[in-house]
Amino acid sequence: MKFTSLLSLVFVALLTFGCKSEFETIRTSGDPAVWLAKASDYYEQEEYQRAQTLYELAIGPYRGKAEAEEIAYRYAYTYYYTKQYVLASYYFKNFATTYGGSPLKEEADFMTAYSNYELSPVYRLDQSYSVKAIEGFEEFANRYPNSERVSEANNLIDEMRAKMEKKDFESAKLYVDLSRFESAQQSFENVLKDYPETGRAEEIRFLMAQSQYEYARQSYVTRQQERYGKAVKLTKAFLDRYETSQYRAELESILKKSQAKLKELENVRY
């Protein structure tokens, strides 16, 4: 049994070494035709890392020739398939710029944005790549309004905007938890401004009224009149807008307390 296992290991080692030796022989052959032919074989076999290496070698010798377009196209995809999305986006864009008349340009423009979409992280993290992807998809939709992929691009934009909205909303809520009410107010206002169709509008306006009341309550007496006044304004606006809201009872209580406090401050003033 041990001897059989040893033979198996030797066989696997020899097989692996043989494959590597073949690849290295091709890579160091100096023959562009061999590089291109084998790169295409590797690409079809989904061995994208090896295909990438050989396509890279073939780019120079085939520059300006008929084969150059397909080499550049597949070279970009080798980065995408190996999850090197930053470089994939770069090479797809480079392809679209270099081969402006190519029938593959539309796909390359889409994949430029889609590679950035692949880099879009969970909502808690920085959304720079989401912004890049959205800009890319918007540019794609404007450039190819009749493309079958416009619908997909729009859906992906909505997905990333929802993620960015959640990030901004949660950041605003964190300011409330930290009792940084002024920052919370500004952040909530920005969410409503940046995402006018948000499904969180009711909750946001409730949190704005609630946090403004807490802001006024914790303020120095000299600033309370102004801040309670804003709490009353926000609360009334909410109650007028959302007549059957689940937050109505709590805000009616806040409104009464704020009005009573304003009356008290007025009496002290005189």
Image (tube, rainbow, N blue to C red):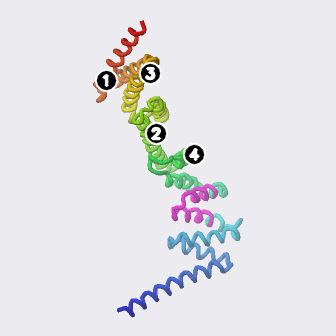
Q: Could you tell me which residue is drawn at 36 percent across and 12 percent down?
A: 264
Residue type at the position of mark 2:
Asp
CA–CA distance between discs 3 and 4?
50 Å
What residue is shown with label 1?
Answer: 243
Q: Is disc 3 surrounded by few (<14), some (14 to 19) or many (20+) residues within 10 Å?
A: few
What residue is shown with label 4?
Answer: 139
The part of the image, by quadrant, that contains residue 69 is: bottom right
Asked if disc 3 and disc 1 are in contact, CB closer than 8 Å, the reply is no
In front: label 3 or label 4: 3
Residue type at the position of mark 3:
Tyr
Where is residue 168 shown, x and y percent of the image? Answer: 46, 39
Instruction: First in sequence, mark 2 or 4: give its number.
Output: 4
Q: Could you tell me which residue is drawn at 50 percent across and 87 percent down?
A: 14
Quadrant (top left/top right/bottom left/bottom right) for the C terminus: top left
Residue type at the position of mark 4:
Glu
Residue type at the position of mark 1:
Glu
What range is drawn magenta here? 71-94
Q: Could you tell me which residue is drawn at 65 percent across and 68 percent down?
A: 67
Instruction: First in sequence, mark 4 or 1: give its number.
Output: 4
Front in this rendered view, residue 9 or 30: 9
Asked if disc 3 and disc 2 are in contact, CB closer than 8 Å, the reply is no
Where is residue 237 shown, x and y percent of the image? Answer: 39, 21
What residue is shown with label 2?
Answer: 168
CA–CA distance between discs 3 and 2?
29 Å
